[in-house]
Image (cartoon, rainbow, N blue to C red):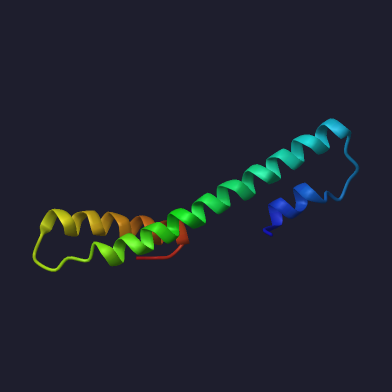
Amino acid sequence: MDNLVKRLRDPAFGTETTERKLMDKAADRIEELEAKLAKAVEALDEAVYLLAPTEKDMERQAGIYRIVTTLAELKGEDQ
């Protein structure tokens, strides 16, 4: 669990019920988006493998380059 979700779920200060519900909803949404992002990264990894060019196809290579750079960005990696 990342630090932000942990802080939302267990704040160091007392909160009102309304604020607590809002913080729980925010933590739930963050976890949902992180799960979707993980699936997208996995799909992009697979797409790179499946779309690897077998010939000199410039359009396909450009698409693969966009996938690879987007994947690296999502993973927080340098090209």
User: Residue at the spot x=82%, y=51% of the render?
Assistant: 10
Question: Percent x, y for residue 51?
Answer: 24, 62
33 or 72, which is in the foreground?
33
How many numbered marks have been drawn onto this rendered protein structure?
0
Horizontal and vertical percent for residue 61? 18, 59
Q: Nearer the viewer, residue 33 or 10?
A: 33
Relative to 30, residue 43 above or below = below
In the image, farthest residue toward the left: 56
Residue furthest to the right in view is 14
x 47%, y 61%: residue: 76
Determine whether 78 is above or below 3 in the image: below
Relative to residue 20, is residue 35 drawn left or right?
left
Q: In the image, what residue occupies the spot 83% across and 31% down?
A: 18
Is 67 situated left or right of 9 in this image?
Answer: left
User: In front here: 46 or 69?
Assistant: 46
The quadrant the C terminus occupies is bottom left
In the rendered image, the quadrant that contains the N terminus is bottom right
Q: Residue at x 22, y 66 (%)?
A: 52
Residue 20 position within the rendered picture, expressed as x and y whole percent measured from the top left: 82, 38
Q: Position of residue 45 (x, y in %)?
A: 37, 63
